[in-house]
Structure formats: C-alpha cells, structure tokens
Amino acid sequence: MAAGKGTRMKSKLPKVLHLLAGRALLQHVLDTAAELSARQVVLISGHGAEEVEAAVSRSVGSTARFDLDFVRQQPQLGTGHAVQQAVPVLRDDGVVLVLSGDVPLMRADTLRHLIAACAGDKLALLTIDFADPTGYGRIVRCGEVVQAIVEQKDASEQQRAITEVYSGIMALPAAQLKRWLARLDNQNAQAEYYLTDIVKFAVADGVAVVAHKIADALQVAGVNSPLQLAELERAWQRRSAEQLLEQGVRLADPARLDVRGTLECAQDVSIDVNCIFEGRVSLAEGVRIGANCVISNATIGAGAVIHPFTHIEGGSNGGKDAVEIGAGALVGPFARLRAGARLGAEVHIGNFVEVKNSTLATGAKANHLAYLGDATVGERVNFGAGSITANYDGAFKHRTVIEADVHVGSNCVLIAPLTIGAGGTVGGGSTLSKDTPAGALSVARARQVSIPNWKRPAKSG
C-alpha cells in the first residue's frame, strides 16, 4: 500500500519516495518482496500516483524478478478500500502478503515466518507489544485465539488497555481475501473501510486467525514525519554498522558511518569517521579509508589507502563507468575520482587531483593540483603539479595518450587529441598540441624576455 499523502512530511514529494539509506522507502519494501521470491507485486498508489509509479518503473526496470501491477486508490477511503482496488488484478491462488510502503525495515525472515503461520489457509497477523499502544489497532483475543482487531477510535476503555497491537502486515489466502473485502462497510468512527474488519469475517467463517508476535519494534516502524525518517535512518545505519563489525571491519565510530547502498568488505578493512558509501562499493583486504570520504560505485583493491576528504564518484550502480582502484594505490587527501577513473596497482593520486574517464597504469603518479580527463596514462608516468589534459573543444571530448615512463613537468597543458611518446619529457609550463616522439624533450612556451629598468604603472595624484 503506497497511496497515503504523508501530510506531516511537509513535502511535495510523495511520502514513499523519501530516501532512507539512499533508497526510497518504497524501494526497501519492493526489495524485500523480491527477496521473498514474490511472483506478483500489486502497488496501490494514490497521492502522487504518477510520480510514484514512474519511480518504481525506473527502479524495477526490465530486470524485475516479479510481475508488477499498478492500481490507484482515489479518493483514499481507508486501508480496506485501498486493498479493494487490487482485486481486479490479484490472482486467486496463493498467499497475499499485505505490506505498507512507508514501513521500510521489515526483515524477509520475519515475513517468511508469517507466511509459514498462514500455511495457505489461515489469516496470519504480525503483532507486537507496545508499552504505549496509542494509535494502533488492538488485538482482541479469547484465550490464545484472535477474535478481532479494534481500531483506536472504536476501542472501548478496556480494549485500549491492550498492549498487543496489529503491525499493519498480514498474510492470508487470496481467494478468501477477495470474499472478505466484498463484505466491508464503513460503519465506524472514521467512516472508513478498515482492512482489519476482515478478522471478524474470518472468525465468522471458521477460518483460523493466528498471530506471529515479534519484539523488534524497528521492523514495524512507519514514517510519517521528517523526525521519524531521521530516527529510522540512524537505526538502519546502526544495524548496518553492527553487521560490518561482526564481519571484522574496523570502524572508528559506528555512529559516524552512512551506507546508502551496498558495502562489501574483505578482511582487515578499516574505516575512519564520517564516511559515506553510496551505490555498490567493494573494499578488498586491508583497504584503509580515511575520515570524511564519500565513495560511490567503486571497487578498491587490496592494501589501497584512501586518505581523508577524498570524493570517489563512480557512475551508475554496477555500470562500466564505476571507479576501479588497484592494489596498493594511494589516493588523496582532497582528491576527486569521477566516473570511469581506473587506477592500476601502486598508482598515486594526491591532493587536489581530479581524474575523470581516465586509465592510469601501474606506478603512475599525479601527486598534486592536476586534472586528468579522457586520458590513457602509461606505467610509471609522473604528471606534474598544475598540469591538465585539455580534453574538451567546446563540442566534443578528445583523448590524451601519455605512454610509459613519461615525465610531465609542472603547469603544462596537453591539448587533446594528443600522444606523448614513451620515455618523453614535457618541460614545465609547456602547452602541447602536437604528438611528441618517444624519448624526446618537448618544450612549448613563449621565449622569456626581460626589460631592464621597467617602471610599473602608477596612479596619478
């Protein structure tokens, strides 16, 4: 269910598209459905339906592991009314799992237990005990048997004292669900069609109603405000940090780590404070990440060191323009690697160096204040401070090839397309626009002129 407006979010963006750990709230729920090997997902949209449906279509794409159907709830007349909209596309066989698009931290294992409790012929409810159950539907039992769910506004004083509440998640046979939905009415305090009313229909029809109770409140926590979103973000990040620590990753401070995608770490990886990982990032054995780094869509080889304040911005998640850093490389501090940067083993990229769509072979170095864009750099090249590849002519990008063992002096401009021959030297301050032969010293700068006794201009008066 993803039809709610989310008024308390105070945002034009539909609530289910707000981000948690770098993904939309709704995307977390869809990912969980895929983990359960769901064969069909029916998305019930409402507020911002077109935007929500477009976002889901983009994220799921042609690689979806389930059939995806969209239905709309307009106007929004309650949870039962929402699920009624799914009836025309919902298959009659199998088990239906009802999930909320703003409850992102539900674990797949918990849902597997719920589905097992359903066993294909029961109505299974996910429940939890809250010390303060205000606002939640109460689980009414006769002994251990569930008799009904009573919403807060319709509950008696005695029922409001019940601490076991309905989480909003249930599993039940599809055919039964359709029959019960047809019997719903809105004769209640809110004049809405409650999905929870199907419990009393199940009891009346002699269908067993079972509850699977959990203790982890985070799994059923919803998002209705920026504060709740921020609280779940920290909870998710803490859970992620604990998983990394259990794998042996050394985190300087688990509270100062943000993983907004997938982070894979081999043995003896260490990560300093205030680092952000986005997209898909893989850190090989012995990698060290300094403080305040932002790393997106990158593979970093064994023993590499990423010094503080480095930004690594690979392109699309898992795409060809992801950043690759070889074993033993040193990057930073204050370096920037952009999409398509590929560094070989033992490459050095120093402070205030930017690399974009360029390959640097083993042992190449650009230690400070340089730009390498659309370049192929050979082994053991030294690229001097203040030097750049001028790769853009205003309309097209061109490539610079710097062959092995070249030394480029400081403050040079290499105007692409250009090839610097192996073993060559480019004199400091040169601007080159023509290919150079192997082993040559190439100097291209204006002749120095000194004018004796020259007077600077002075202000009159």
Image (tube, rainbow, N blue to C red):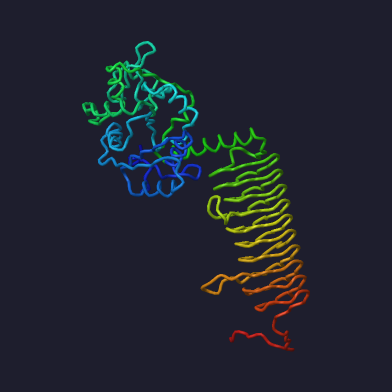
Image quadrant assignment for residue 84: top left
Q: Position of residue 242 (x, y in %)?
A: 60, 34
Answer left or right for 299 relative to 49.
right
Image quadrant assignment for residue 17: top left
Q: Nearer the viewer, residue 219 or 323?
A: 323
Q: Residue at 36% of width from left, 47% of height from top?
A: 53
Q: Position of residue 400 (x, y in %)?
A: 64, 70
Answer left or right for 275 relative to 136.
right
Q: In the figure, 57 relative to 197: above or below?
A: below
Q: Position of residue 26 (x, y in %)?
A: 42, 41
Viewport quadrant of the C terminus: bottom right
The answer to whether one can see residue 413 in this image is: no
The answer to whether one can see residue 147 in this image is: yes
Q: In the figure, 326 relative to 204: above or below?
A: below
Task: Give the residue at the far front of this rendering.
Answer: 93
Q: In the figure, 40 relative to 154: above or below?
A: below
Q: Residue at 36% of width from left, 49% of height from top?
A: 51
Q: Position of residue 253 (x, y in %)?
A: 63, 39
Total marks in image = 0
Q: Residue at 69% of width from left, 46% of height from top?
A: 288
Viewport quadrant of the N terminus: top left
Q: Nearer the viewer, residue 100 or 216?
A: 100
Task: Give the residue at the far top of this rendering.
Answer: 143
